[in-house]
Image: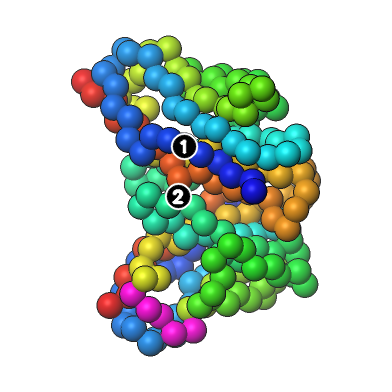
Amino acid sequence: AQRVTQPEKLLSVFKGAPVELKCNYSYSGSPELFWYVQYSRQRLQLLLRHISRESIKGFTADLNKGETSFHLKKPFAQEEDSAMYYCALNRASGTYKYIFGTGTRLKVLA
Amino acid sequence: DADVTQTPRNRITKTGKRIMLECSQTKGHDRMYWYRQDPGLGLRLIYYSFDVKDINKGEISDGYSVSRQAQAKFSLSLESAIPNQTALYFCATSPTGVKETQYFGPGTRLLVL
């Protein structure tokens, strides 16, 4: 079955420390993977997508097909990075498109 | 600005009542979705619609129904609300295409007493 797993419900790091939010997926085809972020009192919004191979707000994520992972990384966390992060998989076929993980709350401590 | 809006933003209702949550968008997207968000469970898809005449059940459609009145409007109804439908509900839209990104509304917080 297709699935997106985010093993950490809560991740706390100190300001300036590196951050890695884990995301693993199971999908037999070629997935498209995304990270969405929800800041306090704001709507869910796209952070980045693997096909763009971009860095947004200092975050990067590399698709590792061998390990079926799409971990989100940032070398130096900032307090404003505190938010809820969702990994999502977009299937190219199937009855519907998006599968979201259960989310990881990131808290960056001063 | 093109946007996704939801009404109401907050709603308190009683068990057994019928309620409707509305979603409107000015993005011109064909595809619209309804999700619910629960702590520890993430976002789960309730219903989705790829155009006005195409409506499909998601993974947790029981107890819900939807109506796609127009390309820009997608309503979610709880026919007879129950307490475990207390959640945060999100509407989302996306353009047609494989490389789609979803655009979310601000959410409706529903409490069923």
Magenta-drawn stretch contains B70: no
- Corner quadrant of residue B110: bottom left
> What amino acid is at disc 1?
Gln
- Which dot, 2 or 1, sits closer to the camera? 1
Q: Residue furthest front?
A: A1
Question: Would you name the residue on which mark 1 appears?
Answer: A6
Mark 1, other Cα within 10 Å: few <14 / some 14–19 / many ≥20: many
Residue under mark 2: which chain is it in?
B
Quadrant (top left, top right, bottom left, bottom right) of the C terminus of chain A:
top left
**Nearer-the-camera pick, B77 or B58:** B58
Q: Position of residue B101 (x, y in %)?
A: 65, 42
Left or right: residue A79 versus residue B33 is left
Per the rendering, the mark at residue A110 is none
In the image, which residues are magenta? B79-83
Magenta-drawn stretch contains B81: yes
Left or right: residue B77 versus residue B66 is left
- Corner quadrant of residue B46: bottom right
Q: Position of residue A89 (x, y in %)?
A: 63, 41
> What amino acid is at disc 2?
Gly
Q: Is residue A38 above or below residue A66?
A: below
Question: Would you name the residue on which mark 2 appears?
Answer: B42
Q: Is residue A42 visible?
A: yes
**Nearer-the-camera pick, B46 or B21:** B46
